[in-house]
């Protein structure tokens, strides 16, 4: 009779570690289907300040939008080529240097138009000097091809993202809403909000922006911010110390 070998629990641990590594790698590139089946969402974490760069694409037409290409243009362009995407727009949620550093390279490679709120045009133009204040460097961005404002709708194939003006972190900060998701830039984070101690920042303005445009969304709306992990509007409504009922902020 064949004698069974004792089960090695360490083998099971190694299997779980390997599986977790595969899943993490998959999620790092952030491949998700949106509320509409034809939307593809990809995330890359770029640059020394770990900015979330998002690529939102229509699966049928391959038209796409790049949101906040802050750095690491080669990685962004590689993913665009792998998915055979046609980049229609580069959208900057605001003009800080860590969110615009790959604008020029992506525009040159794809021909995409750069969109930003007019109130942050000067901030984007001075990004290199802003970066030097932090001991960093960034590639200068070309000027915007078009300014976006409250109520504008940015389209790529059948994907539609509505622009809402969410100042407070900067004068021209915007968020993009649609497909059951909100791209909030540096206005709203998982468990926090954007800094307001930079020029153009104001805490009361930021809280007012978030409550007017973001906290009015359904609880299951997915929040994709400029840094850090994803969240939902419901989680932020209940748990964010700047926004929940115990926050002390009106």
Image (cartoon, rainbow, N blue to C red):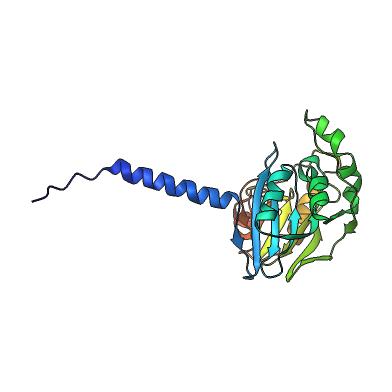
Quadrant of the rendered image containing residue 51: top right
Residue shown at 61% from the left, 60% from the top: 234
Percent of width and height locating residue 91: 80, 55
Residue shown at 89% from the left, 52% from the top: 144
Residue shown at 12% from the left, 47% from the top: 3
Give the farthest residue toward the top.
135
Asked if 217 appears above or below 92 in the picture, the reply is below
Q: Nearer the viewer, residue 48 or 246?
A: 48
Percent of width and height locating residue 37: 62, 70
Percent of width and height locating residue 102: 78, 44
Q: Tell how many labels.
A: 0
Asked if 59 appears above or below 90 in the picture, the reply is below
Whether residue 205 appears in this view of the structure is no
Q: Nearer the viewer, residue 235 or 66?
A: 66
Whether residue 213 appears in this view of the structure is yes
Asked if 214 appears above or below 17 in the picture, the reply is below
Quadrant of the rendered image containing residue 45: top right
Percent of width and height locating residue 250: 74, 53
Residue 234 appears left or right of 15? right
Q: Nearer the viewer, residue 161 or 54?
A: 54
Residue 147 appears left or right of 12? right
Residue shown at 82% from the left, 43% from the top: 201
Quadrant of the rendered image containing residue 197: top right
């Amino acid at each position: 009779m064949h004698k069974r070998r004792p089960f090695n629990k360490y083998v099971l641990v190694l299997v779980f570690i390997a599986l977790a590594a595969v899943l993490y790698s998959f999620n790092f590139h952030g491949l998700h289907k949106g509320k509409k089946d034809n939307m593809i969402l990809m995330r890359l974490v770029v640059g020394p300040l770990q900015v979330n760069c998002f690529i939102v694409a229509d699966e049928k037409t391959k038209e796409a939008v790049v949101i906040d290409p802050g750095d690491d243009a080669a990685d962004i362009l590689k993913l665009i080529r792998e998915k055979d995407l046609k980049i229609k727009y580069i959208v900057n949620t605001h003009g800080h240097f860590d969110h615009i550093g790959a604008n020029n390279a992506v525009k040159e490679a794809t021909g995409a138009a750069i969109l930003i709120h007019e109130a942050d045009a000067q901030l984007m133009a001075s990004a290199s000097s802003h970066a030097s204040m932090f001991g960093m460097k960034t590639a200068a961005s070309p000027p915007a091809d078009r300014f976006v404002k409250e109520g504008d709708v940015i389209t790529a194939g059948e994907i539609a993202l509505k622009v809402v003006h969410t100042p407070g972190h900067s004068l021209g900060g915007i968020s993009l809403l649609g497909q059951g998701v909100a791209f909030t830039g540096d206005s709203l984070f998982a468990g926090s909000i954007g800094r307001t101690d930079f020029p153009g920042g104001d805490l009361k303005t930021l809280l007012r922006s978030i409550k007017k445009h973001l906290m009015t969304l359904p609880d299951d709306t997915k929040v994709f911010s400029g840094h850090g992990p994803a969240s939902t509007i419901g989680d932020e409504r209940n748990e964010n110390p700047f926004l929940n009922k115990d926050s002390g902020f009106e």
